Amino acid sequence: MSPVRRKRSTISLLVPFLIIALVFGALLWNKYRATWMINPTPTVQHPSGKRTVVLFFVADGSRLSREARELEECADTTFCVKETLDELFYGPLGELDEALPEGSVVNAVRIEGNTAVVDVSRNFVDEMPAGSSAEMLAVYSIVDTVCINFPKITRVRLTVAGEGKVVLEHLDLSDPLVADYSLETAPKTSNGTDVKSLKHDVTREKP
């Protein structure tokens, strides 16, 4: 065999081996890079399935106070508000006192833009303790609970057994109410008397 033919035959044999070597080399390189390259996308931490809500109850008989509670995660705002208020109406688990009249429950919740319409049972009115302070604490325990847990809701309108124009002895509930977190504190007068109690006594004495 001539040297030229021998050379061509050798080249013909080398070409397939070179191609195979290149393919395996590329595969090994990709595997090595995938193993050692840091993934730039952080791992997404899935929620635990729980949400923490803030409920407002009564402390010292004169002011609202917060109690945290864990509930199941939910996606529908209307359902979430109803479930949160059901916990509020269920009552405190700690040392705080009930803010709402005995036997009252939430009938339904409706969301209208930034307003939550909360319909409560007739017991809310019929069993309401006498005095403006009791009314304020009961009403704003609901309003503050909704607004603090659902920031997109800025107003709460209370209806009673489907009736929209509700007027308590001292509070008119016909219009939506905004949260009032100042009710968490009970300011004192110079002689130590509770301001809210003082206002409550004056209100009761009006003819």
Image: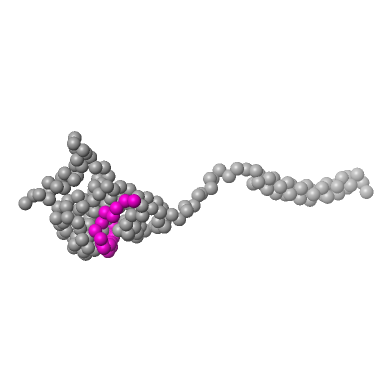
- Seen from the viewer's position, the closer of residues 29 and 67 is 67
Evaluate whether residue 65 shows in this view. yes
Q: Is residue 43 left or right of residue 149?
A: right
Q: Is residue 101 magenta?
A: yes
Which residue ends up furthest to the front in the rendered image?
A: 191
Quadrant hosting residue 181: top left
Residue 54, given in percent of the width and then of the height, sits at 35, 50
- Seen from the viewer's position, the closer of residues 39 and 142 is 142
Which residue ends up furthest to the left in the rendered image?
A: 207
Count of numbered labels shown in the rendering? 0
Residue 102, given in percent of the width and then of the height, sits at 25, 60
Q: Is residue 1 magenta?
A: no
The residue sitting at 88% across, 47% down in the picture is: 5
The residue sitting at 19% across, 62% down in the picture is: 126
- Seen from the viewer's position, the closer of residues 142 and 118 is 142
Residue 199, given in percent of the width and then of the height, sits at 15, 45
Residue 177, given in percent of the width and then of the height, sits at 22, 51
The residue sitting at 22% across, 63% down in the picture is: 123
- Seen from the viewer's position, the closer of residues 33 and 136 is 136
Evaluate whether residue 152 shows in this view. no
Which residue ends up furthest to the right in the rendered image?
A: 1
By secondary structure, the bulk of the magenta-drawn segment is best described as loop
Q: Which residues are magenta?
A: 95-114
Q: Is residue 23 left or right of residue 111?
A: right
Quadrant hosting residue 99: bottom left
